[in-house]
Image: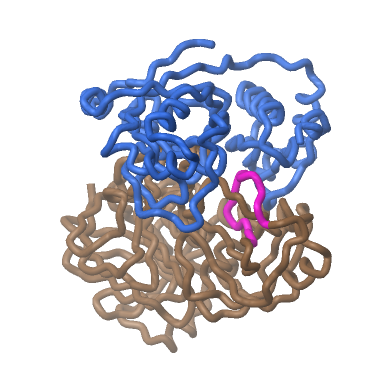
Chain colours: A brown, B blue
């Protein structure tokens, strides 16, 4: 077993896997990553299952070191600043952490969430079949709480050797936040046509009040045609509910399983991470798409994650950002469908 | 509002990976029956790509993988199910749930009783006389929404929430009763507490009740509460199940 130790952690750093599925009918929150694509990509770059348990890092950042043995890790998500013993690494990368060395992830120029995956995933006991942390019910993860300095975590598999290290090439991660695609409904008939148009015109500003449960929006107040109380029904991730005061709330990973406000629209699956990564004060608009378009986008993302994740080797011990920007050759890759230990080493 | 109980369902998208099958817009046992019949039928023979079913008062949310299970196929499957003769897939269970209405457990009972022009003892016996239906879970793990609250204690919710109650609180508000497994602030009134654990992740049955089950409360005194709570904490189920 390989382990890591948390040297420092800001608030809001938790262990998340693909989410706690199967107990929604009993009121259990799914939790899971705020940016599912980035979470899955970090896992895939190591040959893990896309829903393996990884560390979700908030703007508060984290510092870790490896214990006993070198630890191969992958990072993906918002544009965080990643340093390994002071050396700058690309914002999405695979690298090895030696015992005693320090890996720091700090908020960078953009993005809210970053994912740190290790070979085999983080080994904490599953609760109701999942390792995802849900803070409000203190369920999953490490004692159901945020990580803090001094925490020791084990990985579920030995350190990967021979894994391609370098920058992860992931054009899908470049997702400008301006237009967030939605499917109207399930309760858009609670709003008159001009209110739906106001919703789609916006623009909406991401409020500072957001957390893992919800993203609050500021903008034109919407009015309801049929009142704002409905008998509570199921709530999907990305559901946009409009309470009585008229400002929409997008329900995210830590949402409650059911809710009693009309939901005017739902953010499509592939744009959940795009929205989650938008910082407070960012302006967004919603764009209505068809069910077929949403499924098509999902199919493209799934194909990307199922294919080989391209990793561009870093050949110098110390790299400047100019050097990193100058890298263009793609000559290292791993087969994301194969487990950690069988991965091909990068060609030298 | 039970008129819409006989109409065909409406299919609503909650994103590309969840379909809401809505049977009506009101809280009504006949509508709930249709929700639960579809829930049971799909759970008994789930099409490939079906991920999770969430029954609520008047609709069933079907979470699915649209790359495996096409939306049109799913709708056709549901319609086929609706056309088929109703079959009882699962017999609803009846439960007797111990509840202590005395202080310190029923901390809002006197307040509720005063609002409804009753003595605390009358309010407690009214609540214990109710025959409840488990409509759905929601809000937090094991939080059950119970219909069937006797009218004389059917108080509306508080205008502002009260401070956090204890775990396993038995609540009344908005014309319903409920059992809350987790401590939290609430707009409901705490009329009692049950020693039973509605969420016990280490137990084989982490959750006891299924939507559609019926339930009654059995008053117990604080000493009995303490004994049953100790047994429940050691993993025993202290609510009693009887087939109906």
Q: Quadrant of the C terminus of chain A?
A: bottom left
Residue A6 lies in magenta, yes or no? no
Question: Taking A62 as reference, is A147 above or below it?
Answer: above
Q: Residue at x 29, y 73 (%)?
A: A104
Give the magenta range.
A228-242
Residue A240 lies in magenta, yes or no? yes
Question: Taking B184 as reference, is A97 above or below it?
Answer: below
Quarter of the rendering containing residue B133: top right
Residues B127 and A93: in front is B127
Task: Give percent across and percent down for residue A319.
Answer: 36, 83
Residues A334 and A147: in front is A147
Q: Residue at x 29, y 52 (%)?
A: A159
Residue found farthest to the bottom: A322
Q: Taking B100 as reference, is A169 left or right?
A: right
Residue found farthest to the top: B243
Q: Taking A94 as reference, is A297 left or right?
A: right
Task: Give percent across and percent down for residue B44.
Answer: 62, 21
Task: Give percent across and percent down for residue A62.
Answer: 30, 69
Q: Is residue B141 visible?
A: no
Q: Taking B71 as reference, is A304 left or right?
A: left
Q: Residue at x 36, y 35 (%)?
A: B192
Q: Residue at x 55, y 34 (%)?
A: B136
Question: Taking B140 as reference, is A253 above or below it?
Answer: below
């Amino acid at each position: 077993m390989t382990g890591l130790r948390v040297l420092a952690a800001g608030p809001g750093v938790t262990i998340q896997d693909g989410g706690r599925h199967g107990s929604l009918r009993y009121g259990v929150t799914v939790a899971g990553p705020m940016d599912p694509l980035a979470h899955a990509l970090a896992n895939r770059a190591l040959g893990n299952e896309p829903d393996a348990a990884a560390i979700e890092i908030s703007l508060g950042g984290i510092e870790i070191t490896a214990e006993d043995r070198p630890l191969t890790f992958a990072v993906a998500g918002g544009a965080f600043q990643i340093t390994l013993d002071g050396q700058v690494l690309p914002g999405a990368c695979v690298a090895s952490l030696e015992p005693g060395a320090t890996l720091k992830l700090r908020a960078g120029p953009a993005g809210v969430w970053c994912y740190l995956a290790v070979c085999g995933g983080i080994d904490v006991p599953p609760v109701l079949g999942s390792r995802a942390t849900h803070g409000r019910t203190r369920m999953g993860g490490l004692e159901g709480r945020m990580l803090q300095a001094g925490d020791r975590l084990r990985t579920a598999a030995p350190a990967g050797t021979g894994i391609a290290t370098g920058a992860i090439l992931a054009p899908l991660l470049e997702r400008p936040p301006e237009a967030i695609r939605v499917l109207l409904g399930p309760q858009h008939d609670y709003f008159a046509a001009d209110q739906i148009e106001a919703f789609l015109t916006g623009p909406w500003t991401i409020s500072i009040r957001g957390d893992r449960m919800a993203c609050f929006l500021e903008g034109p107040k919407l009015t309801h045609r049929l009142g704002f109380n409905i008998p509570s029904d199921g709530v999907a991730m990305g559901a946009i509910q409009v309470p009585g005061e008229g400002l929409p709330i997008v329900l995210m990973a830590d949402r409650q399983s059911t809710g009693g406000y009309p939901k005017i629209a739902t953010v499509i699956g592939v744009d959940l991470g795009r929205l989650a990564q938008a910082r407070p004060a960012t302006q967004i608009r919603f764009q209505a798409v068809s069910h077929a378009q949403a499924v098509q986008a999902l199919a493209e993302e799934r194909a990307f994650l199922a294919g080989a994740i391209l990793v561009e080797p870093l050949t110098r011990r110390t790299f400047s950002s100019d050097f990193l920007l100058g890298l263009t050759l793609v000559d290292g890759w791993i087969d994301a469908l194969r487990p950690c230990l069988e991965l091909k080493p990068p060609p030298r | 509002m039970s008129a819409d109980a006989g109409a065909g369902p409406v299919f609503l998208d909650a994103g590309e990976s969840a379909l809401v099958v809505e049977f009506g817009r009101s809280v009504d046992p006949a509508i709930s029956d249709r929700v639960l019949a579809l829930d049971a039928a799909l759970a008994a023979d789930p099409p490939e790509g079906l991920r999770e079913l969430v029954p609520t008062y008047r609709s069933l949310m079907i979470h699915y993988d649209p790359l495996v299970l096409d939306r049109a196929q799913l709708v056709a499957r549901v319609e086929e199910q609706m056309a088929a003769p109703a079959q009882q897939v699962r017999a609803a269970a009846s439960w007797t749930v111990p509840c202590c209405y005395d202080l310190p457990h029923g901390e809002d009972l006197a307040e509720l009783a005063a609002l409804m022009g009753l003595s605390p003892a009358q309010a407690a016996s009214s609540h214990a006389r109710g025959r409840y239906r488990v409509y759905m879970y929601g809000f937090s793990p094991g939080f059950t929404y119970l219909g069937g609250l006797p009218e004389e204690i059917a108080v509306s919710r508080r205008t502002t929430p009260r401070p956090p109650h204890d775990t396993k609180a038995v609540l009344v508000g908005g014309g319903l009763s409920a059992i809350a497994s987790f401590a939290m602030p609430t707009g409901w009134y705490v009329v009692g507490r049950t020693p039973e654990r509605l969420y016990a992740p280490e137990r084989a049955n982490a959750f006891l009740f299924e939507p559609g089950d019926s339930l009654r409360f059995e008053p117990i005194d604080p000493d009995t509460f303490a004994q049953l709570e100790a047994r429940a904490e050691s993993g025993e189920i202290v609510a009693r199940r009887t087939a109906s």
